[in-house]
Image (cartoon, rainbow, N blue to C red):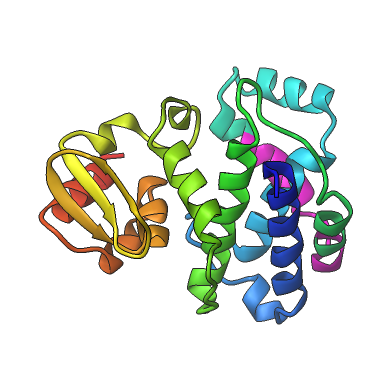
Amino acid sequence: MDEFAQIAQERTMLADVLDGLTEDQWQTQSLCSAWTVHDVAAHLLMPLVTPTYKVIAVMARHRMNWDRANLSLTAAVSTRSNEEIVAGLCEKADSHFTPPGLGPQAPLTDVVVHGQDIRRPLGISRDIDPDRQLLILDFLTGPDASKGFSRKSLLANVKLHATDLNWTFGDGEIVSGPAEAIMMSLVGRGSALADLSGDGVAVLEQRLATH
């Protein structure tokens, strides 16, 4: 399965999860501090339904600050109903959108990570395909991750070891645990550190606290 097919599958699977949520679950705080579950789902739909000219205009309004523009663009899509967001993710599942300068690993990482931002607070477990998880971990520890995903400084002098996959990265204080928890920690979700062990966990915790 190529990467765009994997992205489409992830969008469809997440839409299925969202379709079964109660209104209270839709309004649950996600792992993204600024967003509820509804908002995270809207964020995933946003680049698939927002015209390029509008993105450029909003970026200009926010003086090319992507974080602020992202909040504004997502807020616009968040006005859609739960049902409209689910339908949109299904209808646009096959979109080949990629952020400027990045390949399909970026939207794949985005949908998997944000899927966990939704599932974790709701207590919904999932098994991520091992090959897919490896692809995401390699992306997050690679040179392109600094473009909006993970900070290179997080990786200094730590050795990451996935206990459920044949994957390690780096050299230094050990951070060991499930690949999903490593992934979520690398994108700044401090709550995932509780699933990890090793002397390097305290190092990551300190670095995330100063982010």
Taking the spot 28% from the left edge, 46% from the top edge, the residue there is 208
Vertical order, 25 against 164 (above or below): below
- Front-most of 96 and 89? 96
Q: How many marks?
A: 0
User: Percent x, y for residue 97?
Assistant: 75, 35
- Front-most of 205 and 14? 14
User: Percent x, y for residue 132?
Assistant: 55, 52
User: Is 55 on the left or on the right of 33, as rendered?
Assistant: right
Taking the spot 50% from the left edge, 59% from the top edge, the residue there is 130
- Front-most of 69 and 51? 51
Taking the spot 62% from the left edge, 45% from the top edge, the residue there is 108
Vertical order, 203 against 15 (above or below): above
User: Is 131 on the left or on the right of 207, as rendered?
Assistant: right
Taking the spot 33% from the left edge, 56% from the top edge, the residue there is 190
Vertical order, 56 against 169 (above or below): above
Quadrant location of residue 73?
top right
Magenta span has 91?
no
Does the rendering let one see residue 191? no
Magenta span has 72?
yes
User: Percent x, y for residue 138?
Assistant: 43, 40
> Which region of the structure is painted magenta?
70-85
User: Percent x, y for residue 144?
Assistant: 48, 27
Give the main secondary structure of the magenta stretch.
helix
Q: Quadrant of the C terminus?
A: top left
Does the rendering let one see residue 99? yes
Quadrant location of residue 11?
bottom right
User: Is 113 on the left or on the right of 85, as rendered?
Assistant: left
